[in-house]
Image: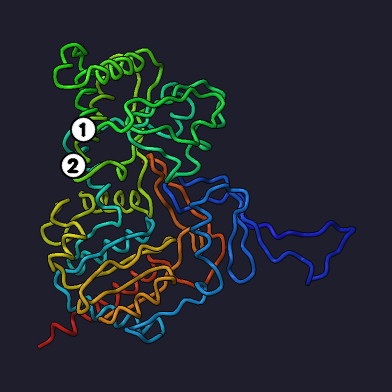
Amino acid sequence: MHLSPTAPSSTRLSDAARPAASITRDWTCPFCALLCDDLAIESHEGGRLAAPAANCPRLAQALACYGEADARGRCSVGANDTDLDTALTHAAQLLARARRPLFGSLATDVAGARSLYTLAAGCGAILDHLHGDALSAATLALQDRGAFFTTLSEVRTRADLVVFFGCQPSRRYPRFFERTLAASPMARDLVFVGCEPDVAALRLAQARVEAILPGADPFDTLALWSALSEGRAPGALRGAHPADAAGTLAALQARIAAARYTVLVYEPAALPGPHAALLIEGLHRIVKAANRTVRAGCLALGGDDGALSVNQTVTWLSGLPLRTHVAAPLDHNPHRYRTARLLTNGEIDALLWVASFAPPAALPEISGDLPAIVLGHPALAQAAKARGGPTVFIPVATPGIDCGGHLFRTDGPVVTPLAAARRAPLPSVATVVAQLTARLNAERPAQEQP
């Protein structure tokens, strides 16, 4: 809903004195996977945006990327500006010649992901997200051992013991504690395992906050904790682990057994690689063991830049998650189809880079002769022009800023609609990709004629 400020009937403002901003209330922020939906955003003349009451540095950083310049974003081919029609024609020609393209970054919403999958099926592309490493670690753990997840609503209304493993949520999700715990009068225990307490947690009046084993090796900690969760006696484990660690984790395990509802919070992207999947498996093993007698669940914080949305969309369209080669037959391999590996080894012959959110995902280091198509925030225009190789740039709308859309929230089952805070004349990713698909379908038969 857009509300234009108006003066009381008894005090009529002149047009020059009237505020130039329109306000969208109950606006949903697309810039992190919490998808906070209680915000008021101001759209000022010239395309500038502000949310002064949000108290979120991540949102402020993203909104600083929008203004008059990006609202006038231009397409380019090579180093020269051009129109959308010409850019689409060149992009279709690049894809028509490719035999093994990579669709990377994929920072878009559900509609954009649907269109990209259709295009990928038409040209045999590989799909990987900007946050593919974190996504793949979570997917591997789910495939190998299963998972026991909870939701933000359950954390807010039921959890009396919240354990944070190796993460301080407010660093990446500044409003996490405000949105999940601050508004509830429930007394809670917050325990940070392997790290110092989050400073935002210390400001919660109704919470008791502590840290245990800060700086401990996460693999050692989870190996010991998992054994204790399965009923091993602390004394039997002290030969391989420090006695204080065994006793500390045994005490935590006793608190889980006594709690009404325990939630283990972790951030896949914050876990050390390359074997983060093993840590995620360990956390879910502890939660599954707890559920034999009490209630517990995991909450994974991640899925930014549309990562969870694209992964969900590709999975329901193909039956396989990201890092899949959309060819006949479909091939999913989280190691083989990693963007960094494909680029380093020169295993692709074209790159389609999608970066519709802000701050936009920068172009990766790629060889100068590799054809590249960039569908991105207008801030990427200069980098695309300066690249030197065969490059097509098309500026696109940001879901929730220039167009509507839908994103999955970090806890999985909730799909949130997005309303445009302003309406710069930029096409959505879904619109551009649909047009590109039509051009590619027209280009291919012409190339296949003798």
Of tags 2 and 1, the one toward the viewer is 1
The residue that label 1 is drawn on is: 219
In the picture, the disc for residue 243 is: none
Q: Secondary structure at mark 2?
A: loop
Could you tell me if the residues under marks 2 and 1 are in contact, i.e. CB atoms within 8 Å?
A: yes
Residues 145 and 269: in front is 269
In this rendering, position of residue 428 left or right of residue 47: left
Q: Residue at x 57, y 24 (%)?
A: 185
Q: Amino acid at mark 2?
A: His
Mark 2 crowdedness (10 Å alpha carbons): few <14, some 14-19, many ≥20: few
Q: Residue at x 22, y 75 (%)?
A: 95
Q: Residue at x 36, y 70 (%)?
A: 375
Q: Position of residue 50 (x, y in %)?
A: 59, 58
Q: Position of residue 244 (x, y in %)?
A: 27, 18
Sequence-wise, which precedes: disc 2 or disc 1?
1
Q: Position of residue 240 (x, y in %)?
A: 14, 21
In this rendering, position of residue 85 left or right of residue 207: left
Q: Quadrant of the N terminus?
A: bottom right
Question: Where 200 falls versus 113 (above or below)?
Answer: above
Q: Position of residue 408 (x, y in %)?
A: 39, 47
- The part of the image, by quadrant, that contains residue 435 is bottom left
- The part of the image, by quadrant, that contains residue 293 is top left
In the picture, the disc for residue 275 is: 2
Residues 280 and 400: in front is 280
Outermost residue toward the right in this view: 10
Q: Amino acid at mark 1?
A: Phe
Give the CA distance from mark 2 to mark 1.
10 Å
Q: Secondary structure at mark 1?
A: helix
Question: According to the image, what is the colour scheme of the structure?
Answer: rainbow
Q: Residue at x 41, y 44 (%)?
A: 409
